[in-house]
Image (cartoon, rainbow, N blue to C red):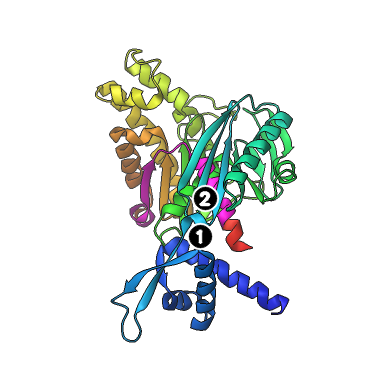
Amino acid sequence: MSKGTAILRQQNEKRTLSLLRIRGTSSRQEIAKELGLSKNTISLIVDKFLKEGIVQEVGIDENGGVGRPRIRLRLVPESYKTIGLLVGSRQCQYVVTDYVSSVLEKGTLAMDFREPVQALEAIGRLCARLLALHPEALGVGVAVPGLVDPEQGLLRFATNLGWRNVRIRETLGSKLNVPVRVMNKVKASALAPAFEMPAGEAGSAFYVSIDEGVGGALLIHGQIYHGASWTAGEIGHICVDPDGPVCSCGQRGCLEALVRLPVLKERLLLAADGAGEDLPFPLVIDRHEGSAAVRETLRAAGEYVGAAMTQVVNLFNPEHIVINSPLHRSDSFRQAVADTLAARALSIPGETVKLHFIHNELLPAIGAGAAIILDFERE
């Protein structure tokens, strides 16, 4: 087999894996038709995957039409795994996921991560241990807060970590015998919901995270759009109230200044006469949403988010908007986002966009692992 033929064969194998990951199950005939390849080519690839335990036969399609019955094929998810990390100032969350991003193992490494040399030494030891336990892992994805150059795996700066110009990929890559991918925390998070969307529905999506800060990411055909200086998606610094408070960026009335969770919790406690100060944010909502003043505070937050999403919908016309935040448990917030978007967005894109409200603190680590899978399929 020539080098060119071997490369083409490998590319077709990756395309087959990607299709089975997205579709769940398929037949040889369907794969060949979808990928525009001959049945013989797909049969050779599938036979190889069956022998290696990457794919399994899961039954016969009785409605497959005339001719020989079509045997359904399914990817064995644990045949390939990834490791995903989220680095914070006081802890590093980690997950081991299978090929469809289901979490197989998770945990936390607690220490002071504000000194990068010591932090990366500890992270390297953690990854080495996980790779020994999970030799099927294709690589390690690292999600960090701050400005990241994903091409170089370089963290330009991260305010809460105190890191500047840290070559994470180079440092970890020299310790580990697998690919290392480094991404901004929010952009990594955006990849995880995209993996869960049905095939054909993830053409474009805008992801929003509302937490200690507010960030966003634009996905086009499942790929993150980073922008010329890697800052695309900074929804937190869209002005939604010109008379609002001054933001950390120096502007007035940014979305982040109005709805980031520490600020919003203060307003909720004020509306609830201070009750529940020691409660985590989700429990503050659960305990006090019966109060008219609290509902009004949550409704106002939803209107601010809806106003920002209106600009996203009008500019980018995404199929999906995914909002990841503990605010997902508030009916007042969700309804206000939807109502504001319906009232202010252009009619056709406003009617077609689908809103999703979720909350999963593991999404940055899961998404960083998902990035490894996408890189593997593109090789």
Which residue shows up at 39% across the image and 33% down it?
Answer: 326
Please name the residue that numbered disc 1 is placed on. Answer: 221
Please name the residue that numbered disc 2 is placed on. Answer: 218
Up/down of 35 relative to 203, above or below: below
- Specify start and end residues of the magenta stretch as a single range: 348-373
- Can you give x and y, in whole percent of width and height, for residue 249 in the image? 59, 30
Q: How many marks?
A: 2
Tag 1: amino acid: His
Up/down of 116 relative to 219, above or below: above
The answer to which image quadrant residue 13 occupies is bottom right
In depth, the one of 69 and 259 nearer the eye is 69
Q: Quadrant of the N terminus?
A: bottom right
Which residue shows up at 34% across the image and 70% down it?
Answer: 59
Nearer the observer: mark 1 or 2; the answer is 1
- Can you give x and y, in whole percent of width and height, for residue 153 in the image? 69, 46
- Can you give x and y, in whole percent of width and height, for residue 363 in the image? 48, 42
- Relative horizontal placement of residue 285, taking residue 30 as reference (left or right): left
The answer to which image quadrant residue 148 occupies is top right
